[in-house]
Structures are given as structure tokens and as C-alpha cells.
Image (tube, rainbow, N blue to C red):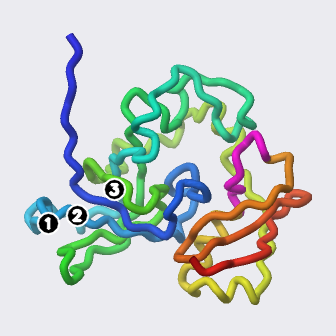
Amino acid sequence: MEESLQLHVVARIRSDFTSKFGIPRQSNLVQSLEAVVVFEEEYRDENALRGLEGYSHLWLLWGFSEVHQQGWSPMVKPPKLGGNRRMGVFATRSPFRPNPIGLSSVKLVRMEKRPGLGTVLVVSGADLMDGSPIYDIKPYLSFTDSHPDARDGFAADHADERLPVEFPPELLNRIPEEKRPGLLAALSLDPRPGYLTGRDDPYGFPYAGKDVRFFVENGIVKVFDVVEL
């Protein structure tokens, strides 16, 4: 007999990425990216957070809000494999799953009270799009959640891939200073779809209220414009 579970949105993420393009494909790839977990009004109870300040990292269980109506596929094409090799969905972190749920490990930078929002969680290393629903938050436990000898399958072949970034100073100055390190690191991960990495077409994505436009040439990410949104 098929069973179902109703999930409640306990919080939403607030980040500088308002579209999924450009977001690091895994959590913790860019530690300099900060985001804010804002609890839904029903769950703004200080008692629910008691003791959380003692942890350095958290697990976020969240929803792929842009794909929940697109269904799932038993075979998917991981971007880092060039988009032309298929793998089983359960061997990947593809959003096209039977249950479109994401799992991210983030660092708890601080907890702070904000007017009208109650206590929020400032986290770093998140890979969530702005507004993504969060279904649960759990503490990360180093003595059981960390496995230094774990095997990473085919994902390990591309784990350290980074590209140099050319960002003209006059364009970089259009980005708030505190947000520049995160943007540069995100660009170095090459946000383009895997099956298009052999082309030098122009791309762009929204970040911190700007449209950052770039292309990749000879293995270098080159930013050519930053436009106010």
C-alpha cells in the first residue's frame, strides 16, 4: 500500500541567487556565500532553537521548488559528465527525483534576531535558490556524519575542477564588496550546463540584484557586463 507524508514548510532560504542557474551544484563548494534561513511565522518559537548555538554545521532538508511538477526519471544526465552520459537517479543528486527533496550541509555562521522575522540563521555554503522551502533543520554531528574514508563514485573525477575568472575591476566594483568573494568562487565553478561547455556562448545569471554576464574562452571565465536588475 502506497503511503504518503505531508511535509510542512518550516522556513525559507534568502540568498543572492534568484534563479537556479549560477548556484553552486553542491553545498560547501563556496564557503564565502552566505544566506539566511527565515522561519515561517508558525515556527518562530525560540524554544525550537534552544541548543542550536552549540553546533557549527547544520543539515537542511529542502524542496526543489522549480521541478516538483516535472516528474522524475530513473536515469539522468549529470552535468559534470558532459550531459551525455546517463546514471541512475539514486546515484546522483539530480532534482528530478520521486520526491524532489534536497539535502545540504551548511555552516551556522550566527543566529540573530531581526525585526518582524524573529530569530534567523545566517549560514554559509548553501546551494539553495532564493525562496526555496526548507522542510527540516538538523544538527550536523561530526562523530557520525563525517566519513573521511568514503568513496565518491564518478563524482570524484570532477570534484576539484575550477576555472580562472577574469572580472574587470570597473565591473566588479558594481557588486557590493562583501558579496564579491562568493560571486568569484561561483563563477570559477563554471555554471554552464555540462553539454555546452565546449561553446563560448554568452550567459548570465542574477546575483545580489545584478545580472552578471559572462562567457568562457580557452578555459577562462570572462565577465563582460554587470547590469542592474
Which sits earlier in the primary sequence, circle 1 or circle 2?
2
| Mark 3 secondary-structure assignment | strand
State the residue in front, 43 or 148. 43
Q: Which residue is mark 1?
A: 44
Which sits earlier in the primary sequence, circle 3 or circle 1?
1
Q: Which residue is mark 3?
A: 58
Q: x, y percentage for residue 72? A: 47, 27
| Mark 2 secondary-structure assignment | strand
Q: Which region is colored magenta?
A: 188-196
Tell me if residue 106 is in the magenta stretch.
no
Q: x, y percentage for residue 208? A: 53, 75
Q: Amino acid at mark 3?
A: Leu
Q: Amino acid at mark 1?
A: Arg
Q: Which of the two discs, 3 and 2, sits closer to the camera?
A: 2
State the residue in front, 46 or 55. 46
Q: Quadrant of residue 180?
A: bottom right
Q: Which residue is mark 2?
A: 39
Tell me if residue 194 is in the magenta stretch.
yes
Q: x, y percentage for residue 104? A: 42, 50
**Tags 3 and 2 touching, CB below 8 Å:** no
Q: Is residue 113 above or below residue 203?
A: below
Q: Amino acid at mark 2?
A: Phe
